[in-house]
Amino acid sequence: MFTGEFKVSYINYQKQMTIAPKQSEAIQLRNLNWLIKLFPKVTDILIIGCGNGLEALFLKEKGYSITAMDIDITAFKELEAKGIKTICYDAEKQDYPMNEHFDIVLCINVIEHLHYPNVLLSEAYRLLKKGGKVFIGTVDYNKTNKDWFWDMPTHYTPITSKSLEGYLLINNFTNIAVKSYGQMAFPFAGLLGFWRLIPMETSKDYIVGIGYK
């Protein structure tokens, strides 16, 4: 898959993901809890880049109708067993054969892995119902560790709060809001059987953008 220095970087990336999986999951769930508070009446949610399936399973348990898309089908078997529709999909190359179908398009930690973010956002706009919302979460390149970002061989496009706002704007979204915040997993909470996020106002290294159709 990767060779030379890229292979070494990918191995290091895999190690990082196994060292702190609970912290990663806690951040994902914080984003989803915020989403639910903002849009409690939505029913149909499309997740582009469902990854390990955490978001899809969490939202399914909350009673939402979920369609999960990813180019990697690793999590599909578990998701399908829970009644979640899955689609192998490359958001940068394919047109999903449906228009104006979803209340929300959700992309958490996806946009920085794309060569062409505008393709994703134009697709999101097309797939949303009128009045639908896109929800984008990613690290803020201006406030994160640059070496960490580029050490991950699947990172292609650095995103900032300003560039995320721009991507949403030029793809015709309105009522755009971009929020910056920091987060960490409370280091001793795992000993008590749970994980909790504590806002870190000094770092604000994560950004969340919302746009309305």
Image: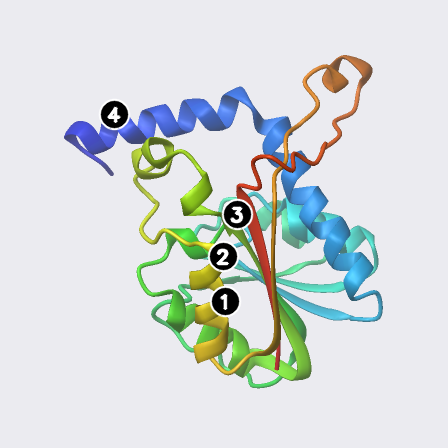
- The residue indicated by pointer 4 is 8
Q: Nearer the viewer, residue 91 or 79?
A: 91
Q: Quadrant of the C terminus?
A: bottom right
Q: Is residue 168 above or below residue 141?
A: below
**From the viewer's perspective, is 202 left or right of 35?**
left
Q: Earlier in the sequence, mark 2 or mark 3?
A: 3
- The residue indicated by pointer 1 is 165
Q: Is residue 117 above or below residue 131?
A: above
Q: Earlier in the sequence, mark 4 or mark 3?
A: 4
Q: Earlier in the sequence, mark 1 or mark 4?
A: 4
Distance between the alpha carbons at the discs numbered 3 and 1: 24 Å
- The residue indicated by pointer 2 is 161
Badge nearest the viewer, 3 or 1? 1
Which quadrant holds residue 190? top right
- The residue indicated by pointer 3 is 51
Total marks in image: 4
Distance between the alpha carbons at the discs numbered 1 and 4: 34 Å
Label 3: element kind = loop
